[in-house]
Image (cartoon, rainbow, N blue to C red):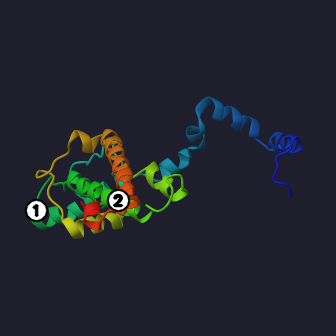
Amino acid sequence: MSAEITTGDLAQFKQDLQATPGASALQKAVMNNGINATAENTDSKVAMTPTFSIELDTGSVANQKQSGRCWMFAALNTMRHGIQAQFKIKDFELSQNYTFFWDKFEKSNYFYENVLKTADQPLDSRKVAFLMATPQQDGGQWDMLSALIEKYGIVPKSVMPETYSSSKSSELNGLLNLKLRKDAVALRKLVADKASDADIEA
């Protein structure tokens, strides 16, 4: 079987589409209303009325704004409910900026460690190119936050509130990645020059 798409295949696709009942009406509906609106099942909206017998006191909505910290916010939001209930606190939040700072700190150190591990490889090797492409970024998952909390703990948001850089992290990420790449070049040179471990760690 050939992996190539031929003109014969295209003709067959068109013929199959034209032979499909309702395809023309569906095509016009999608073109005029969009995919999501056309695919919406209005019957399910009636059948799934959002009425609940138990409602949780969620507190104020936490806003990650223009940052990639959804994983961090989700975990900290889950944790804060237990703290609110235990200490009878209303509208309490844990500091997302605090864990954000230590996440950047640990990711930067991890990058440096990988730079040293690959210092004997050329800059254009696939592994080094991958490292240099994105030295660090905002993304993560629950086990990473668990490790951060185990090592550095957590604090209330009032102790370390949000800042411009935590709420809109693209500028910070760009500058931090530039700094990390420059440091990577310096570290690779130290290794190439057979510098001592003390000089490299400094």
Q: Is residue 38 left or right of residue 171?
A: right
Three-letter residue code for mark 2: Tyr
Residue 52 position by quadrant: bottom left
User: Percent x, y for residue 190?
Assistant: 35, 57
Q: Which mark is residue 112?
A: 2
User: How many labels were placed on the picture?
Assistant: 2
In the image, is residue 115 above or below residue 24? Answer: below
Residue in view at x 20 percent, y 42 percent: 163
Residue wearing tag 1: 88
Looking at the rendered structure, the secondary structure element under dot 2 is: helix
Q: Nearer the viewer, residue 195 or 23?
A: 195
Looking at the rendered structure, the secondary structure element under dot 1 is: loop
Residues under numbered marks 2 and 1 in contact, where contact means CB atoms less than 8 Å apart: no
User: Percent x, y for residue 194?
Assistant: 36, 63
Three-letter residue code for mark 1: Lys
Q: Quadrant of the C terminus?
A: bottom left
Taking the view exactly as shown, the residue that stands out farthest to the front is 193
Residue in view at x 29 percent, y 66 percent: 196
Residue 137 in view of the camera: no
State how far apart marks 2 and 1 are (Cα): 43 Å
Q: Nearer the viewer, residue 88 or 62?
A: 62
